[in-house]
Image (cartoon, helix red, strand yellow):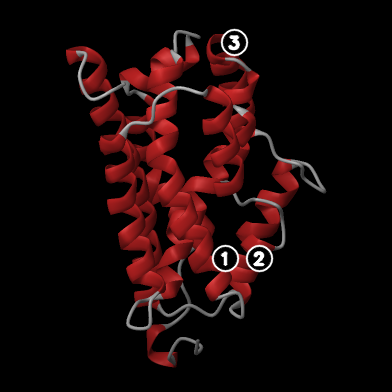
Amino acid sequence: MSAPPASEGAPAEPLSQALKRETSALHREAERAAFVGRCLRGEMDAASWAAFLDALLPLYAALEEGLRAHRAAPAHAAFLRYPLARAPALTQSLRGLNVPRDPEAAALGRRFGDHLRALAGARGAPHRLLGHAYARYFGDLMGGQMLARRVGASVGPEGVGWLEFDLPAPAPAIIASLHKALDEAPWTRSERAEIVAEAQLAFRQSVDLFRFLDGALATGSGLP
């Protein structure tokens, strides 16, 4: 990855700040989903929560495969420096819930995962994976514990284990370290824009997933 050409000039703000600013509206939209409201009110049922995890599992598996494949890049390696990977823990949580799996939710997650695998592939743009890493892991680290408490009260602790991290330092310190890695990498302007666009896409994927789950709950279809 080369340094930005002199004609591009220095970016006006750190990438981490641009990511936060450019995803804030989509973040709020995701938080307003009815599914999220049910989680926060402690009204979640095991089948609906399992459908959510069924969609997340292939997404995280693809993201984490891509990060490992490109670990020679410093910014990708930064996300592997800490025990952030969620795919193994999601698998365990789904086993703990012990409810029928949702093939439609899993298919939606696989479509999301296919996009990430394309980014990581030989003809892809692996720097764009970092937009998804930003959206997924920072959300899990910042809001995961509260969500685990609220949902765990409804579905049991075995279903929320994937939201528990065994971290070597407080979550804010790890996030600050990851911000630093994102900000110090020598991105070109186009690469910065592409990472931001992928972070926005990650939040849109969350909105789409919540709409799918909300629709299934409203009609009584699509969930086991």
**2 or 3: mark nearer the eye:** 3
The answer to whether any part of residue 40 appears in the image is yes
**What type is the residue that disc 2 sits on?**
Ala
The residue labelled by disc 2 is 78
The quadrant in which residue 191 appears is bottom left
Residue drawn at point x = 51 percent, y = 64 percent: 65
| Residue 182 tag number | 1
| Residue 87 tag number | none
For mark 2, give the secondary structure: helix
Q: Residue placed farthest to the left in the image?
A: 219
Q: Are marks 2 and 1 in contact (CB under 8 Å)?
A: yes
For mark 1, give the secondary structure: helix
Vertical relation: 215 (above or below) 58: above
| Residue 153 tag number | 3
Horizontal relation, residue 70 to residue 103: left or right: right
Q: Are marks 2 and 3 in contact (CB under 8 Å)?
A: no
Return the x and y of residue 75 as percentages of the image width and height.
59, 70
Q: CA distance from mark 2 to mark 1?
A: 9 Å
